[in-house]
Image (cartoon, rainbow, N blue to C red):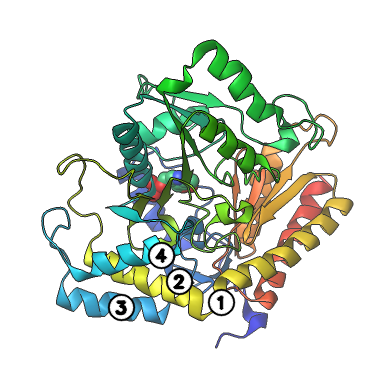
Amino acid sequence: MVELKTIPDIKVTPPGPNAKKLLELDDKYISPSYARFYPLVVDSAKDCLLKDVDGNTYLDFNAGISVVNVGHSHPKVVKAIQNQATKLIHYSNTDFYYEESLLLAEKLCNVTPGNFPKRVFFTNSGAEAVEASFKVARWHTRRPQIVAFTKGFHGRTMGALSLTGSKVVQRRWFFPLVPGVTHVPFGYCYRCAFKEEYPGCDFQCINYIDEVVFETFLPPEETLGFLFEPIQGEGGIVVPPDGYFQRLRKLAAKHNMLLIDDEVQTGLGRTGKLFAIEHWGIEPDVIAIAKGIAAGLPLGACVAKANIMDWDPGAHASTFAGNPVSCVAALATLNILADENLVDNAARLGESCIKRLKEMQEKYELIGDVRGKGLFIGIELVKDRKNKKPAKEEAHEIIFQCFKKGLAIITAGYSTIRIAPPLVITEELMEIGLEIFEEVLRNVNAG
Ligand SMILES: Cc1ncc(COP(=O)(O)O)c(C=O)c1O
C-alpha cells in the first residue's frame, strides 16, 4: 500500500534523462500527427497511479483518456487476460465462433438501455464502433443522410471523421469526406449558438433542426437519424440541459428516424450511470461503445436493436474485432464495475468534486463554467467572464504545471480542463489532485 503523503512523488523534474532519450526516438520515428499535452513517458501504472521512466509517481486524472475505468492493471482483468492468452488469443470472430465473444455480446445486450432484443457487432476501436453504427443505420433505413452535432467527436477514420465536428485541424486537408452528414449546433448552453437562455429558449437548438434544417435543405425522409455524444467529451465536456434528449427523441419519432448514441467516452460508468444517456431515460436505437469496455485492451462494439441490425452476411466484418482476450477483459471489467460499486463511486465522488470546483469558481475569475456528471467533469476557463473568450494558453499552462507537480490531467475543447480519473479513485486521492489543481490555478489566475 502506497502512503498517501508520498503521492504524487516527483524525484526528477520531468522529463528526466530516461524520458528525454525516449522522446528523441519519438521525435525521429513517430507520426507527428499525435498532439501530446506534455512529455509524460509512462513506464507502469497501477490503480490511479502512474510511474514514469525516471521513477516519478503521478496521480492519474486521465485514466488513459477515459479507458481504465476499473483502474490500471486491475488484478482480475490481468488474470482474465493471462488465462485467456494461454488458451486462445485469436481465431477471427467474423469467420468462426468462440464462447468469449458470445458471452460478452449477451452481457452487453442485457446491460445497455432498453429491454428489447439487440445484437452486437464487435470492433477494435471507438471510431470503428461509430463506423459500424453509421453503416448499420444506413443499411437498415436505406436513407443516405445523417445529422451530427458541432463540437461532437466520433473518431478519425473517414466515416467517423465525417461525423466529427470538434476541431477544424481534425478535418483540414482530408476532404472530400463521406457525403450525407449535416452538422447542427449541440445543446451547449454556456455558448448557445442561438444566444438564448435555458429554459426560456424552449430548445431553440432542437426547433431549428425541424423548422430550418428539415424545412429548407435536408429532406427528413432521406435522413436516417441523429448521431450524438450524450455528453460531448473532446468538445469540452458539454452536458446538454435536462429535457434536451427527450425533445430530440420526439423529433426523431416524428420523422421515423434513429437515435445513435456514441457512448465511446461516456460509457461504462464514467458519468455515474453505466451509460450516460440513462441520465435522461432515453433508450437509443443504436449505441457505440469502446474505450472503458476492456480496461485498456482494444475493443469496441455497436449494439443495435435486433430489428435494425438486419444486414446481410458479408455486409460488414473485421478480422481482429472481438478477439477473445479483449472479450474476457471486458467481461471482467463489467463484473468489477458491479462488484466494486464503481458506478456509484463515480456518481458520489463526481458530485463532491463539482461542488468543490464551484467553490473555486467563486474565487477564481478564470473559471467560466463547471459542468459534468460522475467522474466526467469539465472546468471551462475564460479570459473574462463577460466575453467568454477561451483562456487557451492559461488552460495549457495549468495542465503543464500540474504535470510538473505530479498530477496527470489534460484539456478538452479549447480551454476546458478535463477531470476523468479511474473510477476506483478514493476521496483522499481526489482531494490530493484537487489541491494540486487549485494551487496551480491560483498562480495562473494571479498571472
Ligand atoms: C465520443 C468518442 N467517439 C469516438 C471516439 C474514437 O475512439 P477511438 O480513438 O478508439 O477510435 C472517441 C475518442 O476519443 C470519442 O471520445
Q: Is residue 234 above or below residue 112?
A: above
Q: Amino acid at mark 4?
A: Asn
Q: Nearer the viewer, mark 3 or mark 4?
A: 4
Q: Position of residue 140 (x, y in %)?
A: 31, 35
* Residue shown at the point (72%, 30%) measured from the top left: 192
* Residue shown at the point (48%, 71%) measured from the top left: 70
Mark 2 burial class by Cα count in 10 Å: few <14, some 14-19, many 20+ = many
Q: Is residue 44 left or right of residue 232?
A: left
Q: Nearer the viewer, mark 3 or mark 1?
A: 1
Label 3 belongs to which residue? 80
Q: Is residue 192 visible?
A: yes
Quadrant position of the C terminus in the picture: top right
On residue 108, the disc is none
Label 4 belongs to which residue? 110
Q: Nearer the viewer, mark 2 or mark 4?
A: 4
> Marks 2 and 4, how far apart in space?
26 Å
SS at badge 3: helix
Q: Is residue 27 above or below residue 44?
A: above
> Marks 3 and 1, how far apart in space?
20 Å
On residue 72, the disc is 2
Mark closest to the chain's N terminus, 4 or 1: 4
SS at badge 4: helix
> Marks 4 and 1, how far apart in space?
18 Å
Question: Is the C-beta separation of discs 3 and 4 under 8 Å?
Answer: no
Label 1 belongs to which residue? 341
> Marks 2 and 3, how far apart in space?
14 Å
Q: Is residue 40 visible?
A: no
Residue furthest bottom as drawn:
1
